[in-house]
Amino acid sequence: MLRVAVIGGGPSGSCAAEILAKSGIKTWIFERKLDNAKPCGGAIPLCMVEEFDLPESIIDRKVRNMKMISPSNREVDIILDDIYPGSKKEYIGMLRREVMDSFMRNRAADLGATLVNGLVSKIETGTNKQGPYTLHYNEILNDQSEVKGKQLEVDLIVGADGATSRVAKAMDAGDYNYAVAIQERIKLPKEEMKYYEDRAEMYVGTDVSPDFYGWVFPKYDHVAAGTGTMKQNGGLIKSLQIGVRERAKKRLVNGEVIKVEAHPIPEHPRPRRVVGRMALVGDAAGYVTKSSGEGIYFAAKSGRMCAEQIVESSQNGKIIPTEKDLKIYLKKWDKKYGTTYTVLDILQRIFYTSDGAREAFVEMCGDMDVQRLTFDSYLYKTVVAMKPLQQLKLTLLTLGSVLRGKALAPSTYKPVPSAVRDDKEVDKMLAVSSIKGGIKKNKSQ
């Protein structure tokens, strides 16, 4: 009987373990911290809810309004009622990773995977990395008060252990560029929280990120405000987070930070994602899209596709798949999603290069054709071909927006106005306190 270790209990590892366990394959899933809350905006497309059978109980908010905010504070509203008139089913799911990850991990365990609360510290890979593989790990027992060193021998490993993957190091998967993300969870006054009930905001500008965007996403009883930047700008990450708070401070007025989180995020797939009988999925493989920074759906999908290939090639666990067998998963993945990653990489290179380009990007987001194409692609993971007239219109719109964007780009950045209070009231509140706790501004900044 085939023995498989899935290292990492996030969406990619949980989905892989679920498929393997369902097929009767002996499966262990390792998660070093069962209450782990990965720093993450926590936005998922509608198709993920259906495809991965996620219950509505784990979704905090159903966002139907997205606000894009340019460096000059131009605000463009993307309203799903306008994009999909007469339909109320479309939404962006907002959730807390600790809630979703726990649900998916426990579902895999209920289906037969052995859930291990432990940290894998060493992997012996056998001759030429072909296995069998010996895992050395510390299992956490008795309500995390006791740690016990153990070993386990398996035939195959699925590395779902994130951007700093130990499996990737063991298989010499090679390095990749990565971004650093930071996020603060902020409790807001009742009026401000009501504004974010079904609305999310994305801020662009050099003040919030030279590479990506800043966000304010609603959760169950708070908002998550964060940003990210490439590792070469990592030293700026705290000042960029303060930039998000400054731009949004009139909408986050009198908020209180309840948690600060930070984490690396991959920027492209690793050079090697399968070596021997070890395969990488999710962040460990580098499956996060440029421009949008989306990773949850692709993590879950890669875990499922990898596991399905293992099941097929092993004849439901009767034989041990070869490296060649596992690489079929990569061919299928690259064929299905390679174009998506390339297109989003190009968009990032075009629209995140300057504040003028960012102004153009936000202006373009006001066009209904752009909105429809974007949300069809995001919510349903389908690519809708443009008609010739749409292509011409989009080209002219892009050129016009870029030319105007250069003129509109601001020399300084200002907070956006409150959406629920007048200026006098907000200024009074800010005089007492803006946001309590969280990232502190250095004196040198």
Image: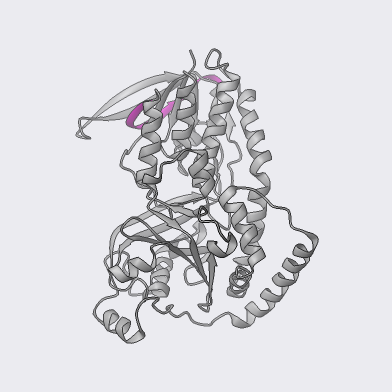
Q: Residue furthest bottom?
A: 424
Q: Quadrant of the C terminus?
A: bottom left
Give the residue displayed 54% in from the left and 38% down from the top: 301
Give the residue displayed 46% in from the left and 60% down from the top: 234
Which quadrant of the structure image shows residue 181? Answer: bottom left
- Residue 5 appears in the figure: yes
| Image position of 179 (left or right of 254) | right
| Image position of 164 (left or right of 444) | right
Q: Nearer the viewer, residue 103 or 298?
A: 103
Whether residue 106 is situated above or below residue 224 in the rendered picture: above
Whether residue 323 is situated above or below residue 236 in the rendered picture: above
Q: Nearer the viewer, residue 274 or 414?
A: 414
| Magenta stretch: helix, strand or loop mostly | strand
Whether residue 411 is situated above or below residue 46 in the rendered picture: below
| Image position of 258 (left or right of 102) | left
Relative image position of residue 213 (x, y in whole percent): 51, 64
- Residue 276 appears in the figure: no
233 in the magenta segment: no
What are the residue bounds of the magenta stretch?
Answer: 114-128
Relative image position of residue 243 (x, y in whole percent): 42, 71
Counting the numbered discs, the total is 0
Q: Residue furthest front?
A: 86
| Image position of 186 (left or right of 356) | left
120 in the magenta segment: yes
